[in-house]
Image: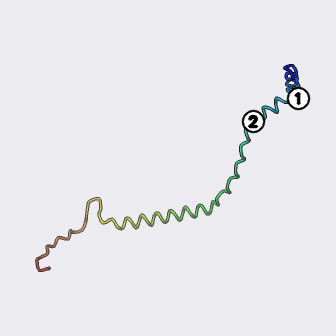
């Protein structure tokens, strides 16, 4: 095979679409199809859950507020100031 024969074969292959087939090997793969979206949550169930969370949050706030024994002015009750004696009274 001479150079002329190789050039002739290359020209014939190019005319027949051989170049397109040769470059097709370097095409990028197609991206995978995305997964379908999950179904939308039920609006009523979401509203009930939000309401239950709000009630729980309010209960916690009330419970915590009841443990605070001071006010912005400080302790309002009398301070327990009793001196113990040596005999335990």
Q: Is residue 53 left or right of residue 22?
A: left
Q: Position of residue 59 (x, y in %)?
A: 45, 67
Measured in 3D between alpha carbons, the distance from the residue under mark 2 to the one under mark 1, in whole angstroms, is: 19 Å
Give how far across and how far down residue 39 sits, in percent.
68, 57
68 relative to 5 in the view: left or right: left
Task: Give 19 or 36, whichever is nearer the viewer.
Answer: 19
Q: Residue at x 54, y 63 (%)?
A: 51
Q: Is residue 17 above or below residue 65?
A: above
Q: How many numbered discs, if any?
A: 2
Which quarter of the rendering shows the C terminus? bottom left
Find disc 2 in the rendering and name its residue: 27
Classed neighbour count for the residue bearing mark 1: other residues with Cα under 10 Å, few (<14), some (14–19), many (≥20)? few
Q: Position of residue 45 (x, y in %)?
A: 61, 63
Residue 8 vs residue 57, the one in the foreground: 8
The residue drawn where x is 48% and y is 65% is 56
Mark earlier in primary sequence (2, 1): 1
In this view, the residue in front, 67 or 84, is: 84
Locate residue 79, reporting x and y percent: 20, 68
Query: Residue lying furthest top in this view?
Result: 4
List the single residue furthest toward the front: 1
Which corner quadrant of the image does residue 64 belong to? bottom left
Task: Tell me the quarter of the image containing the N terminus.
Answer: top right
Q: Tell whether 69 sits left or right of 81.
A: right
Identify the residue at image location x=70%, y=52%: 36
Quarter assignment of residue 8: top right
Residue 55, above or below 24? below
Count neighbours of disc 2 (C-alpha within 10 A) and say few if under 14, some if 14 to 19, many if 20 or more. Answer: few
Q: Which residue is mark 1?
A: 16
Secondary structure at numbered mark 2 = loop
Picture disc at residue 77 = none
Per the image, label 1 sits on a secondary structure element best described as: loop
């Amino acid at each position: 095979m001479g150079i002329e024969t190789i050039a002739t074969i290359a020209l014939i292959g190019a005319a027949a679409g051989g170049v397109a087939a040769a470059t097709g090997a370097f095409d990028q793969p197609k991206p995978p199809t995305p997964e379908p979206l999950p179904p939308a949550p039920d609006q009523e169930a979401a509203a009930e859950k939000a309401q239950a969370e709000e009630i729980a949050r309010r209960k916690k706030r009330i419970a915590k507020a009841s443990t605070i024994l001071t006010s912005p002015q400080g302790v309002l009750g009398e301070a327990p100031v009793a001196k113990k004696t040596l005999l335990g009274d």
